[in-house]
Image (cartoon, rainbow, N blue to C red):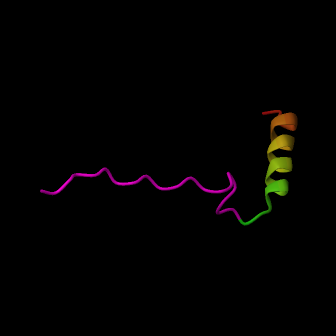
Amino acid sequence: MRLLTRPRPWPPPKSAFAGFRSPAEVIVVAVRWYLRYNSV
């Protein structure tokens, strides 16, 4: 008899910025400036 098991989900990335080329600090500052000074 074989037990059916659910596939394991992928583990979450260690950082929200995983896969980006820029350091996390640069991304955070860019987003902050975009949200603060976006006048469109």
33 on left or right of 18 = right
**Quarter of the figure with residue 17:** bottom right
Image location (x, y in percent) of residue 16: 67, 51
Outermost residue, bottom direction? 21
Q: Quadrant of the N terminus?
A: bottom left
Image location (x, y in percent) of residue 29: 86, 48
Using the image, determine if residue 4 lies above or below residue 33. Answer: below
| x 60%, y 56%: residue | 13
Q: Nearer the viewer, residue 9 or 18?
A: 9
Q: Nearer the viewer, residue 2 or 34?
A: 2
| x 64%, y 63%: residue | 19
Magenta-colored stretch includes residue 9 = yes
In this rendering, the count of numbered labels is: 0
Image location (x, y in percent) of residue 9: 43, 52
| x 40%, y 54%: residue | 8
Q: Quadrant of the C terminus?
A: top right
Image location (x, y in percent) of residue 24: 79, 56
| Residue interval drawn in magenta | 1-20
